[in-house]
């Protein structure tokens, strides 16, 4: 994990949507969505079911093309890329799918190594990289197990390991704690904090769990003590200042209804936003 995100420039947005529109036969999902995610920042995507949170991740990964508008990721206009270009681009992106989406017939080690083998990395280089990333998620001893032998939380952590194997500069998380108990959910959030605060990973995170967003906004990971620490509120927050910022984006009716920091969201009197805070 030593090289993750080291090449990410601070000179411009890591992710930028400009007047993005997306429609299907059932109707339009996005009617002009614009936002930016800065390097090292985590953007929390909120909204009711069907408002386009997962579609945003797929657009950012180049898995979908917008009907109109422009999408830039890591300085590249991916909305106009051909598939061959996108295949190369996606090596810089990690995608943590909802429910993990592991291959049931493959061991944990083979699941994590899948992208490396697709990229024809020499076999002798694969196992050390797989063990390193499994060590990062504290599951190195599961390398020979099948996904069916793991708990739900362990499968989710392996999914994160698979997303990290190519040391991406951006990671896209689709409901990473959905269906997990509170203790396991906290383990996942701690991993995401470590990636942001130690390795500078930029993230888009779609969730229905507002508490996950506030945990990422109000805490940071201290590599010295190897602990998650609440951010100081009195200005004495040098360690937290080095951590990436967390902001929220709320979708409604095909557009961005709210974009801002945790305090703005928490203190809002808007009736629609209040529904997420109850």
Image (cartoon, rainbow, N blue to C red):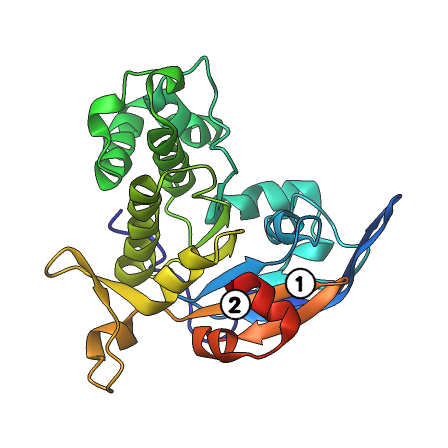
| Separation of marks 2 and 1 at Cα, in angstroms | 10 Å
Q: Is residue 74 in sight in this rendering?
A: no
- Percent position (x, y) of residue 14? 51, 65
Q: Are marks 2 and 1 in contact (CB under 8 Å)?
A: no
User: At x 28% / y 38%, what residue is drawn?
Assistant: 133
User: At x 41% / y 31%, what residue is drawn?
Assistant: 116
The secondary structure type at the circle numbered 2 is: strand
- Percent position (x, y) of residue 100? 47, 32
Q: Residue furthest left?
A: 225
Q: Does residue 50 appear to the left or right of 180 in the view shown?
A: right
Q: Does residue 196 appear to the left or right of 44 in the view shown?
A: left
- As rendered, which of 27 and 209 lies closer to the eye? 209
Q: Is residue 234 in sight in this rendering?
A: yes
Q: Does residue 80 appear to the left or right of 138 in the view shown?
A: right
Which labelled disc corresponds to residue 248? 2
Q: Does residue 6 appear to the left or right of 80 in the view shown?
A: left
- Percent position (x, y) of residue 199? 29, 57
Q: Is residue 67 above or below residue 129?
A: below
User: At x 48% / y 28%, what residue is drawn?
Assistant: 118
- As rendered, which of 211 and 96 lies closer to the eye? 211
Q: Which residue is mark 1?
A: 251
User: At x 58% / y 59%, what residue is drawn?
Assistant: 46
Q: Total of numbered circles in the picture?
A: 2
- Percent position (x, y) of residue 238? 21, 79
- As rendered, which of 12 and 141 lies closer to the eye? 141
The secondary structure type at the circle numbered 1 is: strand
Q: Is residue 182 above or below residue 32?
A: above
Pointer 1 local density, CA inside 10 Å: few below 14, some 14–19, many at least 20: many
């Amino acid at each position: 994990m030593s090289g993750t995100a080291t090449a990410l420039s601070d000179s411009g947005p890591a992710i930028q949507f400009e007047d993005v529109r997306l429609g299907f036969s059932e109707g339009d999902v996005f009617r002009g969505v614009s936002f930016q995610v800065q390097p090292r920042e985590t953007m929390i995507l909120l909204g009711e079911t069907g408002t386009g949170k997962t579609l945003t991740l797929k657009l950012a990964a180049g898995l979908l093309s917008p009907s109109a508008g422009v999408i830039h990721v890591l300085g590249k206009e991916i909305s106009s890329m051909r598939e061959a270009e996108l295949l190369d681009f996606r090596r810089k992106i990690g995608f943590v799918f909802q429910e993990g989406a592991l291959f049931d017939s493959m061991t944990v080690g083979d699941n994590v190594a899948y992208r490396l083998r697709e990229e024809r990395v020499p076999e002798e280089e694969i196992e050390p990289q797989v063990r390193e990333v499994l060590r990062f998620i504290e599951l190195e001893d599961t390398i020979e197990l099948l996904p069916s032998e793991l708990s739900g939380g362990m499968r989710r952590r392996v999914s994160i390991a698979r997303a990290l194997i190519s040391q991406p500069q951006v990671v896209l998380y689709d409901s990473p704690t959905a269906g997990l108990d509170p203790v396991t959910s906290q383990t996942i959030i701690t991993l995401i904090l470590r990636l942001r605060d130690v390795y500078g990973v930029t993230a888009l995170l779609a969730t229905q769990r507002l508490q996950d967003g506030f945990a990422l906004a109000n805490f940071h990971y201290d590599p010295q003590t190897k602990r998650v620490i609440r951010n100081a509120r009195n200005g004495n927050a040098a360690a937290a200042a080095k951590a990436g910022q967390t902001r929220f984006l709320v979708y409604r009716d095909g557009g961005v209804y709210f974009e801002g920091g945790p305090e703005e969201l928490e203190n809002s009197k808007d009736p629609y936003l209040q529904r997420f805070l109850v």
